[in-house]
Image: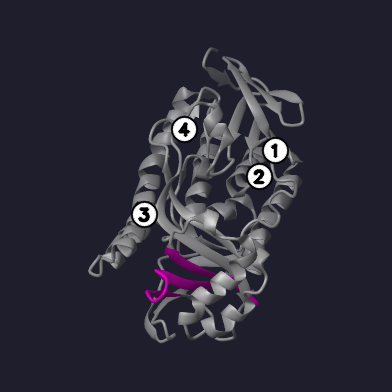
Amino acid sequence: MADSLTRTATRTVLVVGAGTSGNALTVLLRRAGIAVDVVEASPDGKAAAGSGITLQGNALRVLREVGVLEGIEKDGYAAEGVAVLAPDGTVLHAHEELRTGGDDLPSHIGMQRPRLQQLLIDRVRASGAEIRLGTTATALGQDDEGVDVTFSDATSRRYDLVVGADGLHSATRAMIGITERPEPTGMGIWRAPAPRPAGVHRTEMVYGGRCFIAGYCPTGEDTVYAYLVERARDRDALRPATYADEMRALSEGYGGAWTEIRTAFTDPKAVNYTCFDRHLVEGPWHRGRVVLVGDAAHACPPTLAQGAAMSLEDVLVLAELLTSRDDWDDQLFTDYHDRRLPRVRMVVDASVQLGQWLLDGVRDADVPGLMGRTMNALKELP
């Protein structure tokens, strides 16, 4: 059938990118009996990527379906509360967070990102999918019957469908002619892991002082993920060898637990500096038999900690459609886009707005109202 694929035999899918969304999608498709290959450009499978991650309830809802929730609960840290502090560490306000994944899941779990990646990679391997590390797609040739893929190792294969889960700077997106690109928001963030101070049992943030935001989140019984958000710098002027010194100096104006946390900033290789981006592909997320998920289609600043959740919700919706319909056609991919776009746009716009208020120094912004409306909407299933 032209422009569609009707279920007559085992379908084949290539997932480009073994990050959170690519791995989760692979597991869900394999469970339905679909043959999946995964390629990942990083030789180590992103085993050491990132410091920490906050998994909100709606992300946990998907990860439960993937089968890794038990491992996340074991290795991560479920903190039900969030506190806003003064720069000296005095608690100004503390509150419980909305359970966006439902009452049977924590509001959020913090964990070390490399550990989450290992849980997902293990699940992919157990699913029977073929995963090739240090390899990626370099060319895509489509016709009405499938996609011919050329790989960086000079091999080639044919698939019924290709999924671009290769992140913010997606090569897959470029190869299919989608021209939208990430745009900087004007903020940058320093991130680093540190030992968890004995008195830290929840996410705590300072708004103001030398940074827009100075915060930390427990990522396990013994660790936290610390971050400092500032006006974006010219990255060409930053030397990675000085990252630990830069982050430690920037944190000097903060008391309380920061007094202990900053002493861990000694290894520049453990400190990461990146700029915040806004990214949203408004038009279709597919071209023929190639479709995007996650950061390849959308991304936002972590002001709502919803980046991973939005990517995982993409996976849930796409997997539902692929495993429940006989025809893999334009209508399926249009329905996927139409279900996801309004919800993703809401999160992207809210996340950017929260950062813009800080950049503009707006002191009377309705931050609680915007956050509350957005998070309440996310309690609904995607």
Horizontal and vertical percent position of residue 183: 42, 45
Q: What's the amino acid at mark 3?
A: Val
Specify the label residue 352 is tagged with: 3
Query: Can the viewer see residue 59?
Result: no
**Disc 1 versus disc 4: distance between alpha carbons?**
20 Å
Secondary element at tag 2: loop
Q: Quadrant of residue 373?
A: bottom left
**Main secondary structure type of the part rendered in magenta:** strand
Inter-mark Cα distance, 3 to 1: 32 Å
Q: Quick one: SS at disc 1?
A: strand
In the displayed structure, 212 sits above or below 37; it is: below
> CA separation, marks 1 and 2?
7 Å
Of the two numbered discs 1 and 4 on the same chain, state the one appearing first in sequence: 1
Q: Is residue 136 magenta?
A: no
What residue is rendered at 40% in x and 55% in y? 186
Residue type at tag 4: Trp
**Residue, disc 4:** 285
Observer-side mark, 2 or 3, equals 3
Instruction: Kindly indicate whether the residue at mark 2 contacts the one at mark 1 (C-beta within 8 angstroms).
Output: yes
